[in-house]
């Protein structure tokens, strides 16, 4: 859907440069899986276990089911609208400008905070005493990689993903070899009525959300009608198996209290096993995971910001594409600048819930947009979109109150700002007429 502000270029004004289709199924799947197996896999099990107790695996399964609904909806829409921006574009085309803006604003703000968290987590794993300088260096270097073009991003993502998968296989082997606690050692007090499974699933959803990166890169994917659905479902399927398996192994291997209070549960699983000498390998894998997730996040947020700028929901210069590698360089630099400001001014290690709320709102719009599609494949019935929509809202409102209130305030500021900007533009157009 073309926006009203767009016009045909004059002979003196060449059309804006477009992104180029360079990514195949393997690269697209690697970017999605690299995002889902980022820093979240090394930290998310502890806060989720603190809420869900012995029902941690159930929380992972609930998050996985909702993620599957969202992935199917994303695959449907991305095949029809293969342009950068993901649900921001889908919402505008299927539901209207305001739902699209809510999705885009929630994604850009929530994931910018996640970028800062990933960078700082990297710093803490490598050298805690220099965590912030290392985080700043990581943001600068990875932004530079992104500016070299999407194929360089995909190559580095594949390398980092290989390191992370090897690390997770080592953690699984350590947990299986034991020694594990005495019988009953993994038991914990079940949450009252099991309802704490829902906020735990909301936190676990933070770890599953990486497949959105594939959709936000839709303008750079070859044969998007076939590639995007395959890559999304392949990445999610692999991540689901890994997360559910790790949840079961960690509960079997670590005492419940230790798992719930750990700041590095996968590292603890190795240090309390027969393979404890491999702890530095896990630390290196965690650092690689943080870098891989940060790289994919900066890429996805930059593309969504570019798409919003094209529709003037963000400053229009952010839509510029240029350089030898046709990248949205101003959007990438703006995202990097925002992350650096957060690193210098804010403690961002507690933004998992904040980011989860924003992403769940984003995917509720995805499901609502997919629900309106008249033609659909056999594996994507309309009721699946309805289940995904309701599931996202339920998980969002059951997150910790501070996360809900904080992200709701950010969404409200964005909506109010857009309303005021649109009013001002209306007055300017009226005066010019």
Image (cartoon, rainbow, N blue to C red):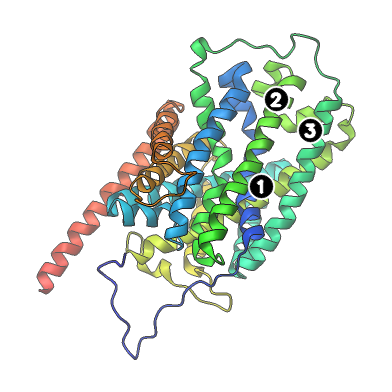
Res 348 quadrant in image = top right
> CB atoms at circles 1 and 2 under 8 Å apart?
no
Apparent side of residue 142 relative to residue 18 in the rendered image (left or right): right
Q: Which of the marked residues, 3 or 1, is nearer the chain's N terminus?
A: 3
Which percent across, then down, holds residue 73? Answer: 45, 46
Quarter of the image for the N terminus: give it. bottom left
Look at the numbered disc 2 and give the secondary structure of its residue: helix
Is residue 225 placed above or below 10 in the rendered structure?
above
Q: CA distance from mark 3 to mark 1?
A: 19 Å
* Residue 256 in sight: yes
Q: Is residue 1 above or below residue 406?
A: below
Disc on the earlier residue, 1 or 2: 2
According to the picture, the residue beneath numbered tag 1 turns out to be 290
Task: Write down the residue under mark 2.
Answer: 248
99 vs 217, left or right, is: left
Q: Residues within 10 Å of mark 1 (few under 14, many from 20)?
A: many
**1 or 2: mark nearer the eye:** 2
Callouts 3 and 1 close, C-beta under 8 Å: no
* Residue found at x 54% / y 13%: 191
Circle 3 is placed at which residue position?
172
Q: Who's the residue at 56% across and 50% down the image? A: 232
Write the residue at 70% across / 60% down.
Answer: 156
Task: Residue at 70% x, 31% y: name it.
Answer: 245
Query: Viewer-nearest of labels 3 and 1?
Result: 3
Mark 3, secondary structure of its residue: helix
> Under tag 1, what secondary structure?
helix
């Amino acid at each position: 859907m073309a926006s009203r502000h767009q016009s045909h270029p004059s002979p003196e004004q060449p059309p804006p440069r477009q992104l180029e289709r360079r990514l195949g199924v393997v690269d697209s799947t690697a970017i999605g899986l690299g995002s889902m197996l980022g820093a979240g896999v090394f930290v998310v099990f502890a806060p989720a276990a603190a809420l869900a107790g012995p029902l941690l695996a159930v929380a992972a399964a609930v998050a996985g089911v909702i993620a599957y609904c969202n992935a199917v909806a994303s695959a449907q829409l991305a095949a029809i609208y293969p342009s950068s921006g993901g649900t921001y574009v889908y919402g505008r085309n299927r539901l209207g400008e305001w739902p699209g803006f809510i999705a885009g604003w929630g994604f850009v703000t929530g994931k910018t905070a996640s970028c800062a968290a990933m960078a700082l987590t990297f710093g803490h794993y490598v050298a805690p005493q220099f965590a912030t300088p290392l985080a700043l260096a990581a943001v600068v270097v990875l932004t530079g990689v992104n500016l070299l073009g999407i194929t360089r991003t995909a190559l580095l993502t594949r390398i980092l993903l290989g390191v992370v998968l090897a690390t997770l296989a080592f953690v699984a082997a350590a947990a299986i070899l034991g020694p594990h606690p005495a019988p009953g050692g993994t038991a914990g007090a079940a949450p009252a009525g099991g309802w704490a499974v829902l906020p735990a699933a909301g936190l676990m959803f933070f770890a599953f959300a990486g497949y959105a990166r594939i959709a936000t890169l839709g303008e750079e994917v070859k044969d998007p009608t076939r590639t995007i659905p395959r890559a999304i479902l392949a990445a999610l399927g692999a991540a689901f198996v890994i997360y559910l398996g790790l949840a079961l192994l960690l509960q079997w291997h670590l005492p419940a209290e230790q798992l719930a209070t750990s700041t590095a549960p996968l590292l603890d699983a190795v240090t309390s096993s027969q393979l404890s000498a491999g702890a530095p390998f896990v630390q290196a894998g965690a650092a690689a995971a943080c870098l891989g997730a940060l790289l994919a996040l900066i890429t996805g947020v930059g593309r969504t910001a570019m798409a919003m700028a094209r529709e003037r929901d963000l400053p229009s210069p952010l839509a510029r594409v240029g350089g030898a590698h046709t990248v949205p360089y101003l959007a990438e630099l703006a995202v990097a600048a925002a992350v650096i400001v957060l690193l210098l001014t804010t403690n961002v290690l507690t933004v998992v819930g904040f980011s989860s709320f924003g992403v769940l709102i984003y995917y509720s719009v995805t499901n609502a947009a997919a629900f309106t599609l008249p033609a659909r494949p056999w594996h994507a019935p309309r009721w699946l979109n309805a289940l995904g929509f309701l599931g996202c809202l339920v998980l969002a409102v059951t997150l910790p109150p501070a996360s809900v209130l904080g992200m709701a305030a950010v969404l409200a500021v964005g909506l109010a700002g857009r309303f005021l900007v649109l009013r001002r533009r209306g007055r300017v157009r009226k005066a010019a007429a």
